[in-house]
Image: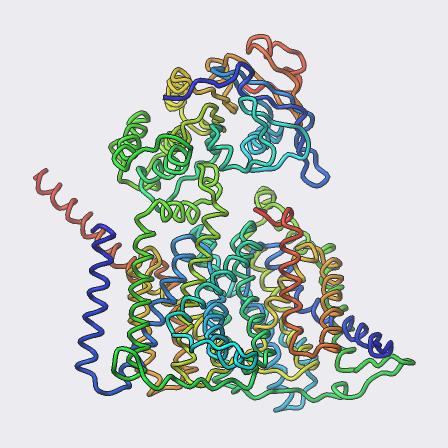
Amino acid sequence: MNAAPGSDGPLLAVSALGKRFGGFVALENIDLTIAAGERVGLIGPNGSGKSTLVNCLCGTLHNETGTVAFDGRPLDGLIAHERTRLGLARSFQLPKPFHSLNLIDNIRVPLLYTVNARPGHHLSDAQVEARCRELLHEVALADKARRLPRDLTQVEMRKLELARAVATQPRLLFADEAMAGLSPSEVEEIIAVLLRLNEQGITIVLIEHIMRAVMSFSTRLVVLVAGQKIADGMPQEVVRNPEVEKAYLGE
Amino acid sequence: MRIGVFWLVAAAVGLAVVVLTRFYFTNEYFFFAAYVVLQYIVLSTAWNILGGYTGYINFGTGAFFAIGAYSSVVLHKMPALLKTFDVVIPAIPLPVMILVGGVVSGIVGLGTGYLTLRLRGVFFAIATLALAVVVQTLIVNWDFVGGSRGIYMIRPPKAPLGGSYIQYLYTLMMVLSVISVGIARWIERSRLGLGFAAIRDDELAAEAGGVPTLRLKLIATTLSGALMGMAGAPLPYYVTYLEPASTFNLAYAVNSVAMPVIGGMTSWVGPVLGAILLGTIQQLATVTISSALNLLIVGLLLIAFVIIAPNGIVGLVQARRRRRAAAGEARAEQRAAA
Amino acid sequence: MVSLDLLINAIVAGILLGGFYAAVTVGITISFGMLDIANIAQPAFILLGSYAAYMFNSSFGLDPILVGIVMLPVFYVIGMAVYRLYYYSFELRGEQAIQGLAFFFGLLFVAEVSLVLIFGVDYRFVEAPYTEGSLHLGMLNLPFRMLIPFIFSLIMIALLQLYLTRSFIGRAILAVSQDGLALQLMAASPIRIKQIAFGISVATCSLAGTFLIIIQPIEPSIGRDYIGRIFAICVLGGMTSFPGMVVAAMLIGIVESITATFYGPSWAPAVAFGFLLVTLAVRPAGLAGR
């Protein structure tokens, strides 16, 4: 379903990325490599720059310094929708559904504008409809296909948010705090969805505060504090890192 | 119904109305009034493509409308001007003027959009307000089209299609109405329309979802501006005396906002409904009350609807239908439980 | 050959005009720059101020600036009422974008048409000792009708700046403009603060309107010329900075004045629009998605 990686190098290569807002340095000298198939957890205190980093990588914000390469291809100058079409997707921290469209159309929009906008085989109307239903089914929202987003519960909105990102057939997905404010069983639901997606071949970066979820999900852990990366490695080792303990260890 | 069928039905309705009215109405006044209502159908539909579908509000309808009107003036005077250089061209037919008016207005829409659409919608709206003033300033200072004194436009002696010239203008405006409604309906059901709706609902999410938001917004502004320009192109022949004060009358700006808002912004039905309703009422009212009072009422209605019924008449009808359906379901459940 | 005398007087006239433009814009700097409310009906409130000055001046012979000051509380209350309506109709529902703009546009329009119905389209003016005559300083010619509003404009802006930076409510307004959440944590209600701020922004129109009718005769459609100007000045001045706004206002005033002197006054409105477009094109980074 998802194309195999085209090169042998890392899927995402971030080098010396920096971002400032006026005089405020939000990100400084961030280096990060992500290989295909990984499950990377990105943690850090509030305001450490996690969302800013995601925004820069996805093209919503423009980083002043540093380079980003996706599957060997430099992303400089590409704006958000172009990066999405290359295979970088993200879900938003606060779900941003298209509130006047029903769930099927919410999935249809990204599908039509990525899968059907890439060179090569395009899906027919019937295939698009079928694929939308399939995606809704995968997040257990198929029976609400014709409803509007305002009729959804919190966890359902989060799942819709993920489904929309998956509709773009990404190679790399940034799940930005997809579990904030959910109950433990709801958190499990979302983790299950993300694991399934990873098995299907999607590399996932999970930005999250809920440590239990991050530890159980991630094959690698990256820690951001005050705009700088202070740790990057196996989850067990990273949490034992004294700097990480000092700067940030939520429960 | 499929879009091809819709076009046929719309064209048939338009044709039927034109033919029937030409037989039944011998008083020219009907055609004068109907022209204005049809003109508002085009203006409202055009406005709504950018406003209701895409979520970007345009306060400068007058500018695009006037550009269409004044480009017709230029084309009208072209043969005489070129004759002084010993270049002979025939008089330019009105349908060609309409197309040219559309192209020029479309380009202005594209330009305004390109300069402001990378910013928030507020700045686009403000720019359109200022644009109206600027275009008026340019026209007022341009003697070739009459400047502030205005210009007389003599209608051709014979109207194509037989009948009076006003009937010809009325028929042309009907064609434009059918075209603009057809375009609006096509957009609604197309991938383009879905992209517009996504931009309206959440532009950031749309962009992240692969929608080329800037490109789509520019398409909307260009299309909207072009249609408004086309609606304005026949105006000089309608009024025969064209001057800036009335051409840039705020009536066009407020009506093209009020009609979709009051009719309903989510589909092609709303602007048509609003145009027919408000347009007809205004045409009837100008005989009895002053045009200023007329416009005051439209303005107050706009404010009232924006506050109380932001989805317009169409929205109210849909809400009532939903409530009835929900009530019906509730009653059915009660009966099943009993 | 450009006459130096003419040029210098055009520049000086532009500076005086700029001072007045700053007074016209300060309300928008507060409502749009600080509160993020695109009050495009601002010119309507200014015209109301002008016509109020006209009424009391022509009927009772009162000094227009005095009228402007006395009417401040009235305009303040009107501003608060408008904000309440705006808040309950739009901000609360979370539907700010298109409906809010349409609302203010409706207000602008209704105001202009009402003024036409009440006062007609004839030009109106006020009479006061300073509407005639000028101050001569060497080759400089400073008309009183521009100098007096200029002085009072700067006084008004200075007083507002003091209020915003020194008083409790003023500082709360500045805080709200940067972070409404922080204010909630301080147990001050952002809604009340915004209401006060919006009230102040409309109150400035009382005086700004008075200055307008002193400088030139007015009629209802003049408001439209000012929309491009005030937003251009606000944006060019950095959205929230009073000093920036004053500088931007003077810049636009000077360019307009030079254009009017050498190319004719009918081109002046286009100048502000040109500025607006240039500003939007050149400074998008600070404006995109605040």
Question: Looking at the picture, how far across and down is residue B274, in whole percent?
Answer: 32, 67
The image quadrant where one finds the C terminus of chain B is top left
- Say whether residue C138 is left or right of residue B101: right
- Say whether residue C109 is left or right of residue A22: left
Question: Looking at the picture, how far across and down is residue C195, in whole percent?
Answer: 56, 59
- Say whether residue B84 is left or right of residue B96: right
**Total residue callouts:** 0
Place residue A14 in its image quadrant: top right
Residue B297 seen in the current view: yes
Question: Looking at the picture, how far across and down is residue B117, in whole percent?
Answer: 53, 52
Above or below C201: residue C6? below
- Say whether residue B281 is left or right of residue C241: left
Above or below B323: residue B65? below
Place residue B55 in its image quadrant: bottom left
- B11 or A127, nearer to the observer: B11
- B44 or B329, nearer to the observer: B44
Question: Looking at the picture, how far across and down is residue B173, in whole percent?
Answer: 32, 72
Q: Residue furthest front?
A: B86
The residue located at (61%, 9%) in the rendering is: A240
Residue C88 seen in the current view: no
Q: Please name the colour scheme applied to the rendered image.
A: rainbow
Place residue A189 in its image quadrant: top left
- C232 or B298, nearer to the observer: C232
